[in-house]
Amino acid sequence: MNCPQCGITDVIEIQHTLPDETEVVFFSCHRCEEKWWDRSGETMELRDVLDLVRKPRS
């Protein structure tokens, strides 16, 4: 994965499964400290990830 801000290829990638079984990936860049979330190839805002986590479990 390339950082969308600086282009470096050495980024941290952490996969998460949210309580509703949604798979998301957190990325963080070592060089410029850009951070972003991804779900199924689509970039997500942090607030959207938090909204998914806050949803009550069935």
Image (spheres, helix red, strand yellow):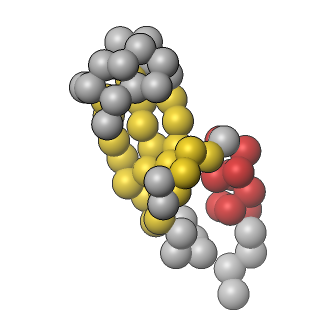
Image mark count: 0
Q: Of residues 32 and 41, which is closer to you in this image?
A: 41
> In this view of the protein, which residue sits in the foreground, 25 or 53?
25
In the rendered structure, the answer to whether residue 21 lies left or right of residue 44 reads left
Q: At 38% from the left edge and 54% from the top edge, which residue is drawn?
A: 15
Q: For residue 26, what is the image quadrant?
A: top left
- The residue shown at (70%, 51%) is 48
Q: Position of residue 14 (x, y in %)?
A: 36, 47
The residue at 65%/42% (across/down) is 46
Residue at 50% over, 49% down:
38
Q: Is residue 26 left or right of residue 50?
A: left
Q: Position of residue 50 (x, y in %)?
A: 68, 52
Q: Is residue 33 above or below residue 43?
A: above
Position above or below: 13 against 25: above
Image quadrant in which the N terminus is located: top left
Q: Up-down: is 29 above or below 6?
A: below
Residue 58 % position (x, y): 69, 87
Q: Quadrant of residue 13?
A: top left
Most distant residue in the bottom direction: 58
Q: Is residue 38 left or right of residue 9?
A: right
Q: Where residue 28 appears, x then y in whole percent?
A: 42, 30
